[in-house]
Amino acid sequence: MDTNRLLERLAQEAQPAPPLPRPWIRAAIWLGGVVVYLAAISFPMTSSADLAANSIGWKFLLPQLAAIVTAAAAAVAAFASTVPGYSRRILWLPAVAVLVWLGSLTGWSLQEWHQGVSVAEPREWLCVAMIAGGGAVPAVFMAMMLRRGAPLTPGVTIALGALAVTGLANVVACLSRPHPKSAVVLVWHGLTIAALVAMAAWMGRDLLNWNRLRADVLRTGDGA
């Protein structure tokens, strides 16, 4: 279809699109679905005996709470970043949450390293696979929801979405395979999450960009 004809048709027939819900509402919807999904896949793998033996106390609970807060803040910021004119100060929320999360692990990790604790545990590859694989479905739905907004900062938007996904997947991995050593979580889980977020940021312009949206509109016009 000729572009001029498409523009004329849009001007004559297009109806105003309803506004998207507020970013925090969209984030709440996504978080609710992801929590149900991750709980369903992790429950069969979670051992109450392991949790009782390894997970009692703030050494375990504080990083998990920080990870959940980080995921929620990143999800809200990701959706807000697709809204024209939305305050970019909201991007500081996940940044602060990440620092708190890292701080909750670093203090205990330094103590463990001074005690000679090793982080070379091959079984941690299962946690790496759980974070990457368990977050695949939530990541798809996050990308689909983000594509409904404006791709103003695609790399940042997708990176925030990936941080939200991996933050929750990390909690599931820790609940399913609780670790008595914070250093192991910091190194293995931290590097996995950092790599996935960096990869997402690199792919951002391919997943969210104006050219792709314009091609979708043109395909819709051709099929009309």
Image (cartoon, rainbow, N blue to C red):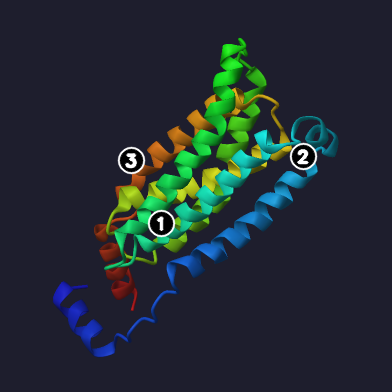
- Along the line of sight, which residue is nearer the eye, 109 or 197? 109
Separation (CA) of disc 1 from disc 2:
30 Å
116 sits to left or right of 18? right
Residue type indicated by callout 1: Ala
Q: Secondary structure at mark 3?
A: helix
Residue beneath the point at 60% across and 43% down: 169
Residue 64, relative to residue 22: is it above or below? above
**Residue holding disc 1:** 78
Residue 155, relative to residue 56: is it above or below? below
Specify the farthest residue to the bottom.
12
Q: Is residue 207 visible?
A: no
Specify the farthest residue to the top.
116
**Residue holding disc 3:** 202
- Along the line of sight, which residue is nearer the eye, 130 or 95? 95
Q: Secondary structure at mark 1?
A: helix
**Residue holding disc 2:** 45
- Determine the image quadrant of residue 67: top right
Q: Secondary structure at mark 2?
A: helix
Verify CB contact (< 8 Å) between mark 1 and mark 2: no
Separation (CA) of disc 3 from disc 2:
33 Å
Q: Tell me which label, 3 or 2, sits earlier in the chain.
A: 2
Verify CB contact (< 8 Å) between mark 3 and mark 2: no
Q: Is residue 121 visible?
A: yes
Residue type indicated by callout 2: Met
- Along the line of sight, which residue is nearer the eye, 182 or 78? 182
Quarter in which the C terminus is drawn: bottom left
Of circles 1 and 3, the one toward us is 1
Specify the farthest residue to the left.
4
Residue 132, relative to residue 151: is it above or below? above
Quarter in which the N terminus is drawn: bottom left
